[in-house]
Image (cartoon, rainbow, N blue to C red):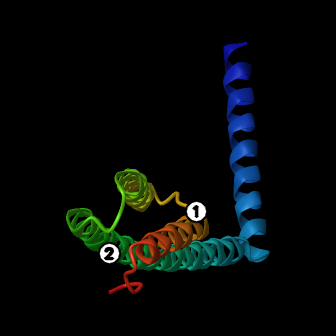
Amino acid sequence: MRRRAVMTGLVVTLALAGCTYLDQRNDLYSGGPARREAAANAELQAAKTQQQDLQDQNLQLEREIERNTKRIDAAQSDLDRVTAELEAARKRKSVSDAEYRRLKADVAKTNQDLASVNMELKAGELTGNVDVAAKERQIDALEKKKASLEKALGMSPGS
């Protein structure tokens, strides 16, 4: 009985080994390894292409953020000049106290909004999650507001 069990185990082992050999031989003859290598190479190329696309998108985003940051810096510099002109106009008494307070509040609000947009851009630069077009629209609106403040003080825009 024991001998029979050993013989049965040996037959099963040989049958499995033979099946494995036959499976490997058939896979080799049908081009299995080459096919798998070609598929892996195609996946690698697709991943490299995707990585390059993402790097290009990231570079474009960084450039847009940098450009908008420069616009914000220029607008804040202009607002500093508007503030100085507003103070000078007050000293010359060429604006009423009520008009001064209104313009001063408008300048402060515009400066605050510019700083907020700037912070959002910088945060978006770190996370890579920023709607540049929306920020550009906000900057455009704030630049128009700045121009109207300059006009109210009789300054030439961007002077």
> Relative to residue 122, is residue 147 drawn left or right?
right
Residue reaching furthest top? Answer: 1
**What is the secondary structure assignment of the residue under circle 1?**
loop
Q: What residue is pinned by disc 1? A: 131
Residue 78, numbered circle? 2
> Relative to residue 121, is residue 92 drawn left or right?
left
In the rendering, at what x and y percent does residue 36 appear? Answer: 68, 70
Image quadrant where one finds the N terminus:
top right
- Residue at 71% in and 20% down: 5
In the rendering, at what x and y percent does residue 65 appear? Answer: 43, 72
Count of picture labels: 2
> Relative to residue 45, is residue 20 drawn left or right?
right
The residue nearer to you, when weighing 42 against 142, is 142
Question: Which kind of residue does numbered mark 1 sit on?
Answer: Asp
Image quadrant where one finds the C terminus:
bottom left
The residue nearer to you, when weighing 140 against 59, is 140
Question: Which kind of residue does numbered mark 2 sit on?
Answer: Asp
- Residue at 68% in and 38% down: 13
